[in-house]
Image (cartoon, helix red, strand yellow):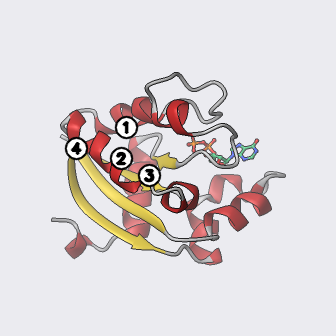
Amino acid sequence: MEKTFFMIKPDGVKRNLVGDVVSRVEKRGLTIKAMKMLQISDELAKKHYAEHVDKPFFSDLEEFITSGPVVAMVVEGPKAIKTVRNMMGATDPFEAKPGTIRGDYALIIDENVVHGSDSAESAEREINLFFNEDEIV
Ligand code: IDP
């Protein structure tokens, strides 16, 4: 069993896609171990996207990710990290295959509906950034 961090970004929440995205996770057979809605602060955005803070798109990314509530989750299952990444589709929705979340619901890289950890190290780091141990059931 593996745990990963999964998040519905502000565009997904604004577009009322929470139910659908959560339903896809549940129907796939993954288990939701923690879930909460929160508004990301500038400080948390810089920590979460630490690898991107020096990139030219960071200010747009920070503005976007703090622009409204997100739904953050800890999701568990066999090979959960890669399984969730496969369900999300490519970072650029133009490249994302139909049937994936981004391939079905997004058009541009700036607003691509979901985030999921890309490695075991990021999963651990991101879960600890968003959740206390006692919030994970
Ligand atoms: P990921 O979300 O698929 O893991 P990352 O490369 O970690 O992709 O990028 C994090 C987020 O930063 C992306 O989901 C996207 O919203 C945003 N992003 C990445 N590259 C660009 C870009 O070139 N322009 C604008 N936004 C970008």
Percent x, y of residue 1: 18, 40
The residue that label 4 is drawn on is 26
Picture residue at 62% right of the left edge, 33% below the top = 93
Q: Say if mark 3 contacts mark 4, CB within 8 Å.
A: no
Q: Secondary structure at mark 1?
A: helix
The residue that label 1 is drawn on is 84
Marks 3 and 2 sit apart, C-alpha to C-alpha, by 5 Å
Residue type indicated by callout 2? Asp
Residue type indicated by callout 3? Leu
Residue type indicated by callout 1? Val
Marks 1 and 2 sit apart, C-alpha to C-alpha, by 14 Å
The residue that label 2 is drawn on is 20
Number of the front mark, 1 or 2: 2
Q: Residues within 10 Å of mark 3 (few under 14, many from 20)?
A: some
The residue that label 3 is drawn on is 17
Q: Secondary structure at mark 4?
A: helix
Q: Secondary structure at mark 2?
A: helix
Marks 4 and 2 sit apart, C-alpha to C-alpha, by 10 Å
Q: Say if mark 4 contacts mark 2, CB within 8 Å.
A: no
Number of the front mark, 4 or 1: 4
Percent x, y of residue 61: 71, 58
Number of the front mark, 3 or 1: 3
In the rendered structure, which disc, 1 or 2, sits on the residue that comes first in sequence?
Answer: 2
Quick one: 104 or 118, which is closer to the camera? Answer: 104
Picture residue at 22% right of the left edge, 44% below the top = 26
Left or right of 22 in this view: 41? right
Number of the front mark, 3 or 4: 3
In the rendered structure, which disc, 4 or 2, sits on the residue that comes first in sequence?
Answer: 2
